[in-house]
Image (cartoon, helix red, strand yellow):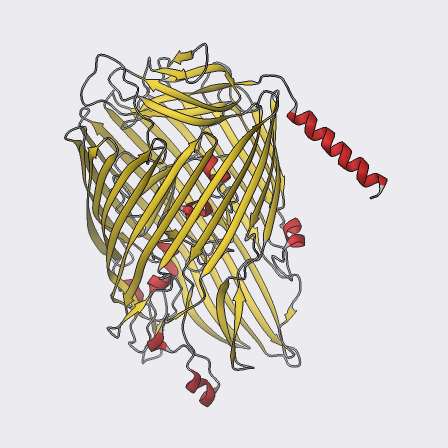
Amino acid sequence: MTSSIKKYKVLSLLLFIALCGNAQTLTQTVKGKVIDATTGIPLTGATITLLNIEPSKATITDDQGFFLLENVPVGRQSFICNFLGYEDALVSEILVGSAKEIDLTIQLIELLEQLNEVVLRAPKDNSRANNNLATVSARSFSVEETKRFPASISDPGRMALSFAGVSNSDDTTNEIIIRGNAPNQLLWKIEGVEVPEPNHFSEEGYAPGAVSLLSTNMLGKSDFFTGAFPAEYGNALSGVFDINLRNGNTNKGEYAFQFGVLGTDLSLEGPFSKNYKGSYLINYRYSTLTLLNQIVEVSDNSVPTFQDLSFKVNLPLGKKTNLSFWGIGGISKDNQDNAEQININITENEQFDSKTYMSGINLTHFLNTKNTLDLALSYSGNESTYERRLEAINTNDFYTERDLLSNSALRFSANLTNKFNSRATLKSGLILSQLFYNVRTDETLNTTSDITVNEDGNAVMGQFFTQSKYRFTKKLTTTVGLHATYFSVNKNFVLEPRVGLEYKIHPKHTISAGIGTHSRRMPLNQYFIQIEDQNGGFSTPNTDLDLMQATHYILGYDWRIIKNGHFKIEAYYQDIDNVGVVADPNFTTSIVNGQFINRELADIGKARNYGLEFTFEKFFSRQYYFLTTTSLYNSKYKAANGQWYDSSYNFKYTFNVVAGKEFSIGKTNNNIFGINAKALLNGGKRGTPIDLDEFDQTGIVSDLEEQRNTIQFEDYFRLDTSMYFRINRPKVAHVISLDIQNLTNRENIDTKVFNPNTGTFDSETQLNLLPLLNYRIEF
């Protein structure tokens, strides 16, 4: 061992001892707001008490519902919130750091029966949805969960892959498959408005993207739905991601800088003045993936780049009105530097650019103590350009394929929430969307072009909903709702009734059920496929396709088997009508397979998804947590020939285990070391055999249509782990983290491609072992 290496180890050891040996007791400020869970109206005079500390520490909310609790010790802390006439709320295991103040929004539920004394209740289900109209297949998730789960890369979409009924078929993308449905059947909402998939490298109708636009620096507690969702959600068939952005700090300026192999990240937040509760929050991120490309081959002939900017400005306008402005935008590129020679005769060059943007103005006004009006005006869109060019080396022959997609939407929404009393609530609203599109898909061989899609225009989608909730007793709650949708492209109008029920047969045992009809339009370019007629003209017959509709039937049972956790089982059946399938019965593919289809479709297909899901979860307490889920399911569709086929996402089962443990380090336990692990086992992906007889006779490679998706590849298995070390110092905190994906370096099959040169199938695998190192400083 050289002397320089010895010195390095000694210095590293001394630094570690210095960081862990800090004997100073650190504290932080915890603040926030207490609101009515139904209307969002602030509650004045609520008491917030810090638990497990002597002497006790408590505070009360002011006339706008705000509270401030100073000198809270750093570490994991729990709080109880009491307010006369409302159920107590326990906020547990909040990570209090030394650099950034903690901002909590505590929602209280009004009691059905008024009590003369405050009763300390058992810990609540930390995963229960923010939306109190949800009864089944819904859960909330926190920013900390998004950061904590291995392989999530601080991405809520990848974090959701640990939930029951959720899977992914490609390690490199952010696709979310819910209960066997295609990824493009999922609705994304941010700050209450519909938005495009918030991912870099996304291409509507083709790919969901690879890296999230959403920074955890911006996120608040949000909801995720996997079926039978409330009536306020439309244009969604499989599930809903309902994202909330947090407000910036209203007391002081705070900053965070992050650097890792995925790039750099900078956030700033703070108040506009000391005597005003308005705030700003800004986050910027830039990445070249250059460092990552040195560790694992992201691309052999290019280095993808992306950057994004997010912001939220919150402006209270008195006690009854709040105005906010927000926006998220990102650009991404993956362009080859030079043409790549793919065989002795041909070179290939690919160019891809995309932009995704969304912004909105939200106004909340409390009409009185029982009624709340929410208004939102937003503009969002996605633009992408893809071109692939093949050139013959020894001739002037060339072939190109292009996708030029531009989709945007201007939306206005209005919601009115009426809380008649502690039992009855009515929420109604409308969403008006003006859609703009300019889409083109073509292929060119030398001087001859074949145009598949070429449309420039606009469309209207109008939605209306109303939903009531009635609490008959402490045990029995029901919801009844109706959603209506009109889409001008196909002039289709649909009504979607929805019903939910929750019955607490015992404080530890709850039965829930939901039935609802849900619809979603196809990607816009799919409607405008050009079909040549007998006279040489072109038509767009897909514009006549009705909206695909799915009726969800769900029955659930939840058992609080342990104090800080639960066991949950859900059975579901989805009956799907108006499914787009290739009109020619000689072809058997369908839009349920999530792929762009350049043929005339007919809405005569059907589909069905059914399954059973098990969840056993311990919420974070006593410095550890775990989540185990098992999903058994079947996903099939009926093509134009009347035969049933497995969908591309019919993996049959998913088994997932996530667990983590924290350790307090240092003389006063100021610092934290954490380790997490995740094991995932799925049924294998599906493929379709090649028609070898046709290949032998003609040399043309085509699918054996009558055996669509009959091949299932080897099971998918992956083990991920992550660890982090949080160092709390006075007014500053350092976080060093390492996320290792596919720890065993297993070569999971992505697809098997027929090689016409050898007449055999070549296997293409998914990501190998991938380490992601990150450093973050907060001050």
Residue 303 appears in the rendering: yes
- Estimate the x, y position of residue 181 in percent, counting from the top left: 34, 57
Q: Position of residue 50 (x, y in %)?
A: 42, 17
Name the residue rendered at 33%, 12% in the picture.
Answer: 45
Task: Tell which of 120 and 532 is nearer to you.
Answer: 120
Measured along the vertical axis of the image, is residue 224 above or below residue 19? below
Which percent across, then down, holds residue 162?
Answer: 42, 47
The residue closer to the viewer here, 595 or 753, is 753
Q: Is residue 523 among the parts visible in the rendering?
A: no
- Compared with 687, 515 (above or below) is above
Q: Residue furthest right?
A: 3
**Whole-percent x, y for residue 238 in the image:** 32, 52
- Please name the residue shown 57% across and 18% down the image: 26
Q: Quadrant of the N terminus?
A: top right
Horizontal side of residue 592 vs 396, given as left or right: left
Q: Residue furthest bottom?
A: 697
Left or right: residue 346 versus residue 409 is: right
Image height of 530 relative to 566, above or below: below
Residue most extreme to the left: 472
The count of marks equals 0
Q: Quadrant of residue 132?
A: top left
Q: Nearer the viewer, residue 39 or 772?
A: 772
| Quadrant of the image containing the C terminus | top right
**Camera-side residue: 327 or 717?**
717
